[in-house]
Image (tube, rainbow, N blue to C red):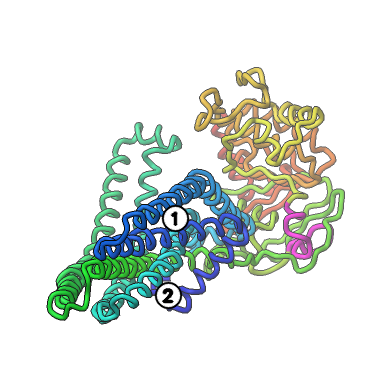
Amino acid sequence: MKEMLTWRQTIAQQWFLTKFCFKHAPGFMVYHLFEAVKLQVSIFFEFTFAVNYVLTVAEEGGDFRKILVCMGILMAAIAVSTVTFAIYKHYVLPRGKQTLYQALRLEIYEKAKEIDLSCYDDKDFYENFILATEETDRCLDRFLLFETSIIARTVGFLCTIVFCAFINPVALVVMAAAFPFELFCVVQENKRVVKSRLERLPHEQQREYGNRVFYLSDYAGELRLYPQMKEECRMEYAEENAKIESVNKKYGKSLFVYGVFREGILGRFIKEGAIWTLLLYQMLVLQALTGAQLVTSRGCIWRATNYIEIVIASLRTVAENSAYIYRIREFLQMEPTVVSRAEKPVPEGSGSLSAEHVDFGYLPGQSVLKDVTFTVKPGQKVALVGYNGSGKTTLVKLLLRLYDPNGGNICYHGNDIREYQVMAYRRSIGSVFQDFKIYAATLKENVLMDVENGSREENYLVEKALYDAHFTLENNQLSYQIETPLTTEFEKDGVNLSGGEAQKAAIARTLYRKQNLIIMDEPSSALDPLAEYRLNQELNEIAKDKTVIFISHRLSTVRDADCIYMMEKGRIVESGTHRELLSRDGKYAAMWKIQAGLYR
């Protein structure tokens, strides 16, 4: 969203956050507003009412004991106020903010979990998602600050204006006359500040990517082996900085002009000069003011003007903040398209899995899969083979229902998979992708991928899954066995697994769950040929009563499959057993001969 929000939209965003905050932390919000209002009321009594009272008593030659009583009451009130504010600042505020941060972030993360994988192919989605995660805490901070500015300053402003109107109503005229011009300047500044921020956002994201390249361990080795890449990254970083600077210059001149007019010409020369001239004229020429009234009137007008400036500055913040809240709400309101047509439970046991004339493309007009048809019977071991870019991994993502096909159907147990509850269907399938991730958690948690209950049975099953995946605890020097933390990002005694061992841990995730259908995308790509052979033999034994679909570039891995599907340019061009395909002397046979030649 590049345009400014209307005032109606702006109010709607603030109302959304108001409801959100009172829903998740009502006690904190009440205390938060109480302290803000109390502070402004205290300032009024201390610097306006008490000052006027003391000066008037002194000017009229009154009893000094009246001043002492006034000061005593004031000091007692300040003492009580200091205690309640200390409780608020050091106890209530940090805990309340943390509660709100967590609540909003959890909503964002829950939404991110249910959003379609296809959204990650969309640049606009990334902008909304990144902005939502980056601006969450700051949006709440700005909202809480704005809320106190508006409510508390309004209370202070009304107290001050009423008192000033009581002792010198004429002095308010100058301040009221200047207000429309100041408001106009702030509105124009707000538009440019928000537009500037939104135009900088994509360049700031690109610059942040450059930052990550330099500080993430994933890139550290390659940056040292290919130093020219460091220069490329630096150049790109400099280019993005230049673009950000260009945006700043684009809006900087107009912001400077409005700022000088509002804060300099309007604020200092006109308002300050006119007010002092008016007050001195009233006192010295008209003799309509006493010394106490002059001091109090000037103090009232200064504070009222200050309140207006703070509120106007807050309007700039709220305009900018509302644009961010709008983007966050856009993200939270996104609805997944991969949804269930019905809520059928997934049948237990092995069932047939079939694709019927499936077409798919990540972008409109760009087909990745074309008229793919095949059937996997219960208990079969089926392999998908082909060169890079043939569509194997995309097909697997459709089988797991991470995407829905653009045309055709995928059926499991005789029903279209869109009839099943999405998460229940996905949980019924065990899967290992070639781009699996190891998380900064314990080895056990990396296998479970769920909340652990800590039982002996759970520990035994985790260890068995690792054993079946040929992951040897002793060989990896794991000090705490399955409780050993993986990666060294947060734990100094953490362990960084080798590529092969990490892949075995990922395979153990699938073996732990004991699903009847297992899909493996290059499950042994990081293993040496001997380890791959042993693992494949073990997997065949473990999964002898299960349906297994696997992708592999190494054809030696798939030779024992019940059926092999050769894919090319998004189509299945050949199918059959290893012997049948070799006897046809087609594309599979050619691929086999190339790989066999390498081993010879």
Determine whether the residue tagged by mark 1 lies in a helix, strand or loop.
Answer: helix
* 460 to the left or right of 31: right
Estimate the x, y position of residue 136 in percent, counting from the top left: 49, 56
Is-magenta flag for residue 411?
A: yes
* Amino acid type for the residue under numbered disc 2: Leu
Q: If you read the primary sequence from the N terminus, does the residue marked by circle 1 or circle 2 appear first?
A: 2
Foreground pick, 554 / 597? 554
As drawn, is 249 to the left or to the right of 141?
left
Image position of 287 (left or right of 84)? left
CB of mark 1 within 8 Å of CB of mark 2? no
Q: Position of residue 177 (x, y in %)?
A: 26, 81
Residue underneath mark 2? 5
Among the 4 quarters of the image, the one containing residue 7: bottom left
Q: Residue 311 lies in what quarter of the image?
A: bottom left
What's the CA distance linking mark 1 and mark 2?
19 Å
x, y percent for residue 599? 57, 30
Q: Please state which of residues 67 and 46 is positioned toward the viewer in this rendering.
A: 67
Residue 434 image point, x, y percent:
59, 42
The region drawn magenta spans 410-426
Image vertical order of residue 425 relative to residue 478, above or below: below
- The quadrant holding residue 199 is bottom left
**Residue name at image x 71 percent, y 37 percent:** 448
Element at badge 2? loop
Query: Three-letter amino acid code at disc 1?
Result: Arg
